[in-house]
Amino acid sequence: MKTTAMVPRVKVSADGAGVVSHAGVGMLRELADLTGQVSAVLADTYKGPWLHDPGRMYADLAAAVADGADSVSGIGTLIDQQAQHGPVASVTTAWRLIDGRVDAAHLTGVKQARAVAREVAWAAGAAPPAGVELVMDVDATITIDHSDGKQNSASTWKKTYGFHPLLVFLDRPDIAGGEALAGLLRAGNAGSNTTADHIAVLTEALAALPEAYRPRPDDPAGADGPRLLIRSDSAGATHGFAAACRKAGVSFSFGFPVTAPVRDAVATLVEAESVAAERGWTVWYPAIERDGSVRDGARLAEATGLVDLSAWPPRTRLILRKERPHPGAQLTFADQDGHRVTAFITDTPIGAVPGQLAGLDLRHRRHARVEDRIRQAKATGLRNLPCFSFASNSAWLEIVLTATDLLAWCKLIAFIDEPDLACCEVATFRYRVLHVAARIGRAARKTHLRIDRTWRWATAIATGWHRIRAAFT
């Protein structure tokens, strides 16, 4: 048996000096100045002068969550690196901020402060390209309560126990992840298609956008102003939510349940297909992939005139899609002619989207990206709601949304030309950027952070850091 040489052992001691880990978190702390706005909102919760600025504490908690913390004690990663970050509030002080100061009465002000920070970040270079349609995705998720004792936790529709928050993300396809516009913490037994909750998060999402990017209610088609679209699965397909979108000047694209009238429309179109083929007409049109190529086995048809849509806003269209299910999938009674049938409704007029039905279908299918947004949000503090009271957990949810925004703005401003960093998911971004090691020292009355030069992304991190500083000065 041939033996292999062991890796030479290194000498280990605990006497290192001038070394910091997680050095890249400093980029997030410099991104947006939440301090002034949040401090002003929470000023009346103090009886006298404060030792630690509440806005600074809020920003530090958001940076710690972006770095991977899943509870308030995660701020300890910043406390341990005060040589780089300066004075940081203790875990106990941070707990008091979440568990007492950011209550329901002050949460609205904190959300407004986050909207101001977004406006500053977009002005610094994180704004979407001019003239493009802004797409918002709304979806709910389940956050499990393992303790079985938090306020308003309840049984969920998935037979678990916890909470059922409703979230809205702004789709940013140029990076891996979106911006978190709004979040509503709900009890675990909250309904999936509750109209009032959808309207509430839509209102918050629009308020979170800078003024210049908000829709004009008297111009729903967006001819003279910003164009906004909100996408949802069938849970958002309610008459009240569709009417609220129309009133707010936002177009919609909602999944639609395949009910008996829809099945009858599918059967009618399938029967008409053979007759139309004899006359050279087309009833079902091919679907396309994201690169513009034809999607094999998927066909589209418009059934607006075959189903009663009078209860929906005017100009609502119904689009049907039939596709061969993947191997092993079980067909249902709702499927026709060996194809899986789905549907969605939209108020986008004919010709507004390139590709006609195929373009509308591709745009609606991209709503599936919200699952990636939620998955990354759960990796950024949403998996665990650490507090007992419902108000404190609502404050924690707002910190999670802030952390999501900080990560998105960091990629958009610092690394938009670095696909390895801009398009990686949050766990990879932490490993490559936030958790980078560096040596810290002082010279000429200045603190100097020297990133490990052997790190593959060292130059990109240093360049991105300077971009952030240049953008906010």
Image (cartoon, helix red, strand yellow):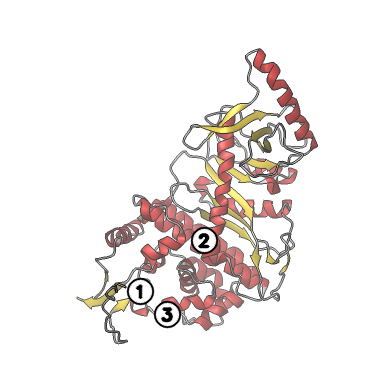
Secondary structure, mark 1, is loop
Mark 3 → mark 1, Cα distance in angstroms: 12 Å
For marks 2 and 1 on the same chain, the one whose residue lies earlier in the sequence: 1
Which mark's residue is nearer the viewer, 2 or 3? 3
Residue 99 rendering spot, x and y as whole percentages: 60, 77
Location of the C terminus by quadrant is bottom left
> Label 1: few (<14), some or many (≥20) within 10 Å?
some
For marks 2 and 3 on the same chain, the one whose residue lies earlier in the sequence: 3
Secondary structure, mark 3, is helix
Residue 260 rendering spot, x and y as whole percentages: 80, 36
Q: Are marks 2 and 3 in contact (CB under 8 Å)?
A: no
Q: Which residue is mark 1?
A: 21
For marks 3 and 1 on the same chain, the one whose residue lies earlier in the sequence: 1
Q: Which mark is residue 114?
A: 2
Q: Are marks 3 and 1 in contact (CB under 8 Å)?
A: no
**As shown in the figure, which amino acid type bears the numbered disc 3?**
Ile
Nearest the camera: 312 or 360? Answer: 360
Q: Quadrant of residue 167?
A: bottom right
In screen coordinates, is 109 left or right of 293?
A: right
Secondary structure, mark 2, is helix
Q: Which residue is mark 3?
A: 79
Who's the residue at 57% across and 65% down the image? 382
> Label 3: few (<14), some or many (≥20) within 10 Å?
some
Mark 2 → mark 3, Cα distance in angstroms: 24 Å
Q: Quadrant of residue 261?
A: top right
